[in-house]
Amino acid sequence: MSSNLGDPERWLDELPEPEALNPEEFQAWRGLIRLREAVMREIDRRLHDAGLISLADYGVLITLVTVPGLRLRMSELGAQRMLTPSGITRVVVRLEAQGFVRREPDPADGRAAFAALTRPGLEALRRAQVVHHATVRELYLGRLTKHELGLLAAVFEKALPGVVSAPIWPPPQTRA
């Protein structure tokens, strides 16, 4: 009989989970994933309902506003947003069509380009930040004390050094 037939419950015995997470590990992991997904989905929904930029657009604009000159090479922007070259190009093209960023050729490398934040892009970001910050505080940060926030940041930093303290994420040496 093929292993694809028969009692599906028996498959669990035949193919046990390798190195299963213990209950504490599972709860911590599940909690992190569920929290992140719930908050991010709600931010995106509220941005959409308010007629503002998407969360993906927000990520690009918030990255650009934090760098000197408000511009980054497309490859660096993609690395910081953890997007593929085609993924970052799609987002930047969409933002460019709205006038929120402009692409500028890199004079040092004719094959490369910069993405630069425009004033309308900054205005769009600032409008979206009102919704973003309110939602993050309502669903997450506002439920924790100042002490708990510090502990949580320390735990995140311990789990993955630099995740809180590094000015750029992911750090250049860990990028693929």
Image: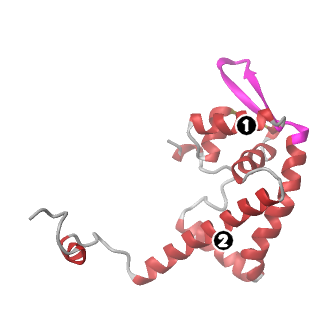
The residue that appears at 73% across and 75% down in the rendered structure is 139
The residue that appears at 68% across and 68% down in the rendered structure is 39
> Which disc, if any, is residue 153?
2
Q: Is residue 167 left or right of residue 69?
A: left
Residue 80, located in which quarter of the rendered image?
A: top right
Q: Position of residue 106 (x, y in %)?
A: 72, 22
The residue that appears at 64% across and 70% down in the rendered structure is 38
Total label count? 2
Give yes or no for contact between labels 1 and 2 (Cβ–Cβ under 8 Å).
Answer: no
Report crowding for label 2: few under 14, some 14 to 19, many 20 or more residues within 10 A (C-alpha): some
Q: Is residue 160 left or right of residue 93?
A: left
Was residue 137 drawn as part of the magenta stretch in this picture? Answer: no
The residue that appears at 55% across and 76% down in the rendered structure is 31
Report crowding for label 1: few under 14, some 14 to 19, many 20 or more residues within 10 A (C-alpha): some
Disc 2 is placed on an element classified as helix
Q: Position of residue 74 (x, y in %)?
A: 67, 33
Q: Is residue 87 left or right of residue 42?
A: left
Residue 172 vertical placement versus 24 (above, below): above
Q: Position of residue 171 (x, y in %)?
A: 59, 48
Label whose residue precedes the other's in the sequence (1 or 2): 1
- What stretch of residues is rendered in magenta? 100-120
Which quadrant of the figure contains the N terminus?
Answer: bottom left
> Disc 2 residue type?
Ala
Residue on which the image places disc 1: 94
